[in-house]
Amino acid sequence: MWVEFQTKMSPFRVFSVQDVKKQFPSMNLMNLVRWQKKGYILRLRNKWYILNDAESHENIEWLAANLIYAPSYISLHTALSWYNMIPEMISTTTSVTTRKTNKFSTHLGDFDYHRIKPEIFGFGYVLDNMDAYIGERGQSRKIIIASPQKAILDFFYINSFYNTADDMEGLRLNEAELQKTLNEEFFRLLARFNNRALERRIRLMIKTYGL
């Protein structure tokens, strides 16, 4: 039973009890408890699991972050680091969500979620393919991540304390990458936030970095 389970669930990378029920309608779910005790599977949060070799898959943390606290998408420090906007390597996976601000420690690392209002959540992100294909139609699991433009705006919306030139300089933003990001799409998204304080911080950022 375990070999069949491993074969079917491996493409999911991160799977829920509901995913298991769909693949194995008649399976006794106590198997999950037994396999967890044996170390075959690892529980991330509530009813979400990974196989014990899942950590070897690239960006598995990001997929897990999307799934275990949904709706959410990767943004803030994690996205800015991915887009080479900030010099630091980020160990915690950061996301925004419409749910309450929260954090979890899991077998895949730490996950931080920051709440934003629903009206500024549902735009400005992209879907990246995982290397896993599920089901007969070969549907790929997607990672949801903020665009470079939305990642910057989310960051300054959440981190409202960046209000001086010294604060901005302390971020050590990559001016070349920042310059490419400050395009028509960036200012269109900024307008959708409809937030004057955010607009002031963006003007200060632009002035501080001479853009």
Image (cartoon, rainbow, N blue to C red):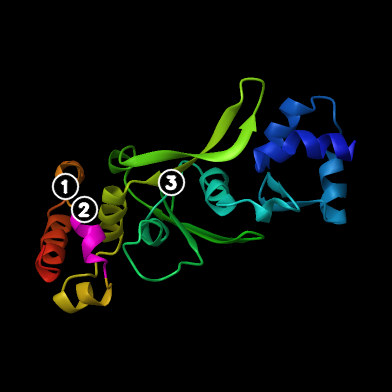
Q: Disc 1 designates what residue?
A: 183
Q: Looking at numbered disc 1 in the image, what kind of residue is underneath it?
A: Asn
Q: Nearer the viewer, mark 1 or mark 3?
A: 1
Give the distance between the C-alpha atoms of the residues marked 2 and 1, in whole angstroms: 7 Å
Q: Looking at numbered disc 3 in the image, what kind of residue is underneath it?
A: Tyr
Range of the magenta residues? 173-180
Give the distance between the C-alpha atoms of the residues marked 3 and 2, in whole angstroms: 22 Å
Residue at the outermost right position: 1
Q: Which mark is residue 73?
A: 3
Residue positioned 17% across, 52% down in the render: 182
Dot 3: element:
strand
The N terminus, quarter of image: top right
Give the distance between the C-alpha atoms of the residues marked 1 and 3, in whole angstroms: 22 Å
Q: Which mark is residue 26?
A: none
For disc 1, the neighbor class at 10 Å (few under 14, some 14 to 19, many from 20) is few
- Tag 3 or tag 1, which sits nearer the N-term? 3
130 relative to 114, above or below: above
The spot of residue 88 in percent (x, y) is 40, 71
- Count of marks, rendered view: 3
For disc 3, the neighbor class at 10 Å (few under 14, some 14 to 19, many from 20) is many
Dot 2: element:
helix
Q: Nearer the viewer, mark 3 or mark 2?
A: 2
The spot of residue 189 in percent (x, y) is 21, 43
Please name whichever residue, 111 or 119, is drawn nearer the observer in this view of the structure.
Answer: 111
- Residue 178 is a magenta residue: yes
Circles 2 and 1: CB distance less than 8 Å? yes
Q: Considering the whole magenta stretch, tell me its main secondary structure.
A: helix
Q: Disc 2 designates what residue?
A: 180
Residue positioned 87% across, 39% down in the render: 3
